[in-house]
């Protein structure tokens, strides 16, 4: 668990940052999710991607989702994501650290905005490390799930996508969110496009799945904690929490 630094420096000037945060808060309040495109710009986005590729080529990614080999092997669930956790301060990933600081800057600022405008009455002052994830293709997917179904403190999921020229028709890998409260036949289909940042409430309001991917699909995820819910969860689980 990492405390947010209230003086996270944003690339944006104050007016731009304020405008972006207003947009994030409005969309989260209205839809439970928000998509920001061209978040870092091409150059910086590519620098982050290069560091993720380096992490992968060094074999640092571990199989995230368990594969349950059913009785007969061909029934096995296709291996899901391969992951590793970084805090962004490591010497080999300064640009991932920069990405994290920019997402923190948005969350810190949004959290500080006028009360009636606050992030769904949350008070956010900490987050997890960043989870670097790769879906190796060959149909790897993530079954429908809720990130925080039982009040472990996580209130916002932030996912940064790194996939240049991704074509969902050819490569799949769509993130499909089934927002609670939307009409039964309505879903949010999010393409994992390069330099795209997605925020959504981490709780039961947003069940989601990653549809089978047929190319390697990269993403970096951060989870932000609501201080009250987090304290309560730590008390309940006596600090054996996994983050
Ligand atoms: O890559 C995407 O579009 C989202 C993938 C996704 O939901 N990943 C994910 C990964 C997780 C890993 C550990 C525990 C909970 C987790 C919940 N969600
Ligand atoms: Mn998830």
Image (cartoon, rainbow, N blue to C red):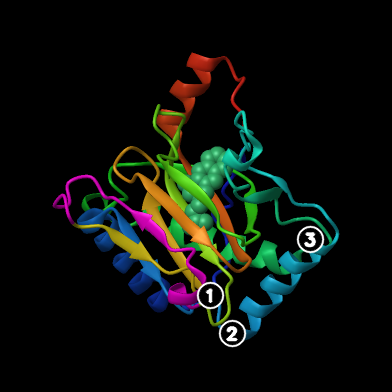
Q: On the picture, is 12 further left or further right than 185?
A: right
Residue sitting at 63 percent across and 55 percent down? 133
Cα distance in 3D space between marks 2 and 1: 7 Å
Q: Earlier in the sequence, mark 2 or mark 1?
A: 2
Residue sitting at 70 percent across and 50 percent down? 87
Q: On the picture, is 230 further left or further right than 181?
A: right
Cα distance in 3D space between marks 3 and 1: 18 Å
Q: Is residue 112 above or below residue 127?
A: below
Label 2, secondary structure: give it.
helix
Q: In the image shown, does 41 or 83 lie closer to the viewer?
A: 83
- Does the magenta portion include 181? yes
User: Which stretch is magenta?
Assistant: 167-185
Picture coordinates of residue 181, whole percent (x, y): 17, 46
Q: On the picture, is 170 further left or further right than 187?
A: right
Q: Are marks 2 and 1 in contact (CB under 8 Å)?
A: yes
Q: In the image shown, does 81 or 22 lie closer to the viewer?
A: 81
């Amino acid at each position: 668990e990492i405390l947010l630094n209230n003086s996270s420096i944003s690339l944006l000037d104050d007016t731009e940052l304020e405008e972006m945060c207003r947009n994030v808060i409005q969309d989260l309040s209205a839809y439970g999710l928000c998509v920001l495109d061209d978040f870092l710009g091409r150059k910086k986005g590519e620098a982050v991607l290069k560091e993720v590729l380096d992490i992968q080529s060094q074999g640092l990614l571990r199989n995230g989702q368990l594969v349950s080999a059913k009785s007969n092997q061909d029934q096995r669930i296709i291996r899901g994501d391969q992951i590793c956790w970084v805090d962004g301060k490591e010497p080999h990933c300064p640009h991932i650290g920069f990405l994290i600081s920019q997402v923190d800057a948005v969350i810190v600022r949004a959290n500080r905005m006028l009360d009636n405008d606050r992030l769904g009455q949350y008070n956010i002052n900490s987050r997890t490390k960043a989870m670097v994830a790769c879906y190796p293709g060959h149909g790897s997917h993530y079954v429908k799930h809720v990130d925080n179904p039982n009040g472990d403190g996580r209130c916002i999921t932030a996912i940064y996508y790194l996939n240049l020229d991704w074509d969902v028709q050819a490569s799949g890998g769509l993130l499909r969110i089934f927002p609670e409260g939307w009409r039964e036949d309505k879903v949010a289909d999010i393409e994992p496009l390069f330099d795209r940042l997605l925020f959504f409430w981490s709780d039961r309001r947003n069940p989601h799945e990653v549809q089978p991917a047929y190319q390697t699909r990269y993403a970096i995820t951060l989870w932000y904690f609501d201080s009250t819910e987090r304290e309560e969860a730590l008390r309940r689980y006596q600090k054996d929490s996994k983050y």
